[in-house]
Image (tube, rainbow, N blue to C red):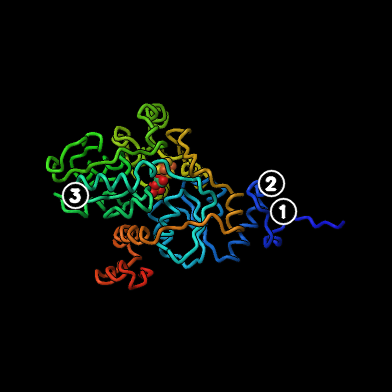
Amino acid sequence: MATTTQDPGNPDQAADPPPTVLEYARFSPDELRERIRRRKAELGAVILGHNYQRTEIQAVSDYLGDSLGLSQEAAATDAEVIVFCGVHFMAETAKILSPGKTVLMPDLRAGCPMADFVTGGGLRRLKARLPGVRVVSYVNSTAEVKAESDLCCTSANAVQVVESFPREQPILFVPDQNLARYVAERTGRPYLTTTHLGERAEESLEPAAVIAWDGYCYVHDDLVLEELADPRRRYPQAKVVIHPEARGELLAQADFVSSTSRMVEIAEGHDALLIGTERGLVDRLRQRFPGKTLIPLSGAAICGNMKMNTLAKLAWSLDHRNHEIVLDEGVRTRAERTLRRMLEPSGGWIAPTAEEEALELAGLRKPGCGCA
Ligand code: 13P
Ligand code: SF4
C-alpha cells in the first residue's frame, strides 16, 4: 500500500500542518523560522514580542518593546492577525484595543503571576468599601480588572498617570505594591498597602493617599540590595538601572529607574551598566552592544512565564490560528475605555466624545477604531 509522508521541514506542506507542538519541536530552528516567515505572510500577521522573550523569539518579532510600546503598536497595526509573544495580559490588551483582529498566543499558560494577585471580584469588593477612591490598574492585570478601573498605566508612564489626578484624590493602585510605592514617592503622596488599610474606614484616609494592592512580581521582588554590593565594587564606573517593580531599598540606590524600553535607550548612551531586571533584556542588550559592560544584577532573574513561548509553539500557533484570545464584549468595552484614557496623551489614539461613548456603551454605535 502506498503511503504519503509529510516532510516536516517543507513549509509548502503548511496547508496540512502536523497537529501537535511536539512534532514542531522536532523541526530545526531554520525550518521553524521559514515556516513562521511564510505563514505570517499568508495570514497577514504581525508578531509582537516583549523585551523579556527568548532571543530567538525576539529575532522573529516584527515589533519588540515594553508594555506601553506594545499596546500602542497593537492599537495601531493594520495586520489582520496579531501573534503575541509575551504573557496573557499583554495579548488581552491587544484584543481589547483591536477587537476586530484575531489575537493569538503561542502558549495560553504563559500568564503573569503578578496580574493574578488581583481579581475583578476582589477589586469590586474593595471599591465598595472605598467609594471615593479612583483606581489605577497597572497594565499587568486582567481585562476584568481593567474594566473595574478608572485609568491604566505601564511602568513607563505610571508617575504621569497618577499626577493626572487632582492632588487630594486618593488612589487605589493595583496590583504592584513596589511600583505603587515608587509612584507615591515620586509624586509626594502618602503610601499604604491594603494590609495596612485593614478595616479602616475611607474617612480616615489621608486625601492624597496611594493605597497599594499587596501584589508583586516574583522576578523583580527577588532582586535584593545585597546583590548590588559585589558588582558595584567590581564595576565602579557602571551606572545602576533598576525596573520599578523592584523593592524600594534597591530603587533608592539606582541612577535610573526605568521601563525595559527606556533601559535600551539608556544602554545606547552608556558604556557600563548594572541592570536590575529580567535576564531576557540584558541578553538582548549584550547582543546589541557587544563592546559594552552590561551586567545583570542577578543571573537568576528569569521570568519562566515569559520563557514559555518557543519558536516551535509560535510556528504551531500561526499554522493552527491558535490559541485565540476571546473576551466578553461588555468587559472588553469597559477595559478599552481605561486603556484609551492612558494611550490618548501618548498620541496615536482619539478617545470618543462623551456622546459617542454613551452610544457605544448602549450598543447603538460601533466602537471607533480610535486611529488618529
Ligand atoms: P515593561 O516592559 O513595561 O517595563 O514591563 C516589565 C514587565 O515586567 C512586564 O511584565
Ligand atoms: Fe509578570 Fe514579573 Fe513575569 Fe513581568 S516579569 S510577566 S511582571 S511575573
Amino acid type of the residue tagged 3 in the rendering = Pro
In which quarter of the view is residue 93 placed?
bottom left
User: Quick check: can you spot residue 262?
Assistant: no
Residue designated by label 3: 131
Seen from the viewer's position, the closer of residues 116 and 65 is 116
Relative horizontal placement of residue 25, taking residue 325 as reference (left or right):
right
Residue designated by label 1: 8
Amino acid type of the residue tagged 2 in the rendering = Arg
Question: CB atoms at circles 1 and 2 under 8 Å apart?
Answer: yes
Q: Residue at x 40, y 50 (%)?
A: 261
> Alpha carbon of mark 1 to alpha carbon of mark 3: how far?
58 Å
Q: Position of residue 278 (x, y in %)?
A: 44, 40
User: Quick check: can you spot residue 138?
Assistant: yes
Relative horizontal placement of residue 149, taking residue 265 as reference (left or right):
left
Tell which circle, 1 or 2, labels the residue nearer the N-terminal end: 1
Q: Residue at x 71, y 60 (%)?
A: 13
Tell which circle, 1 or 3, labels the residue nearer the N-terminal end: 1
* Residue sitting at the far right: 1
Report the mark closest to the observer, 2 or 3.
3
Q: Position of residue 167 (x, y in %)?
A: 15, 50
Amino acid type of the residue tagged 1 in the rendering = Pro
Residue 46 has which mark?
A: none
Residue designated by label 2: 26
Q: Residue at x 37, y 72 (%)?
A: 366
> Alpha carbon of mark 2 to alpha carbon of mark 3: how far?
55 Å
Secondary structure state at the residue bearing disc 2: loop
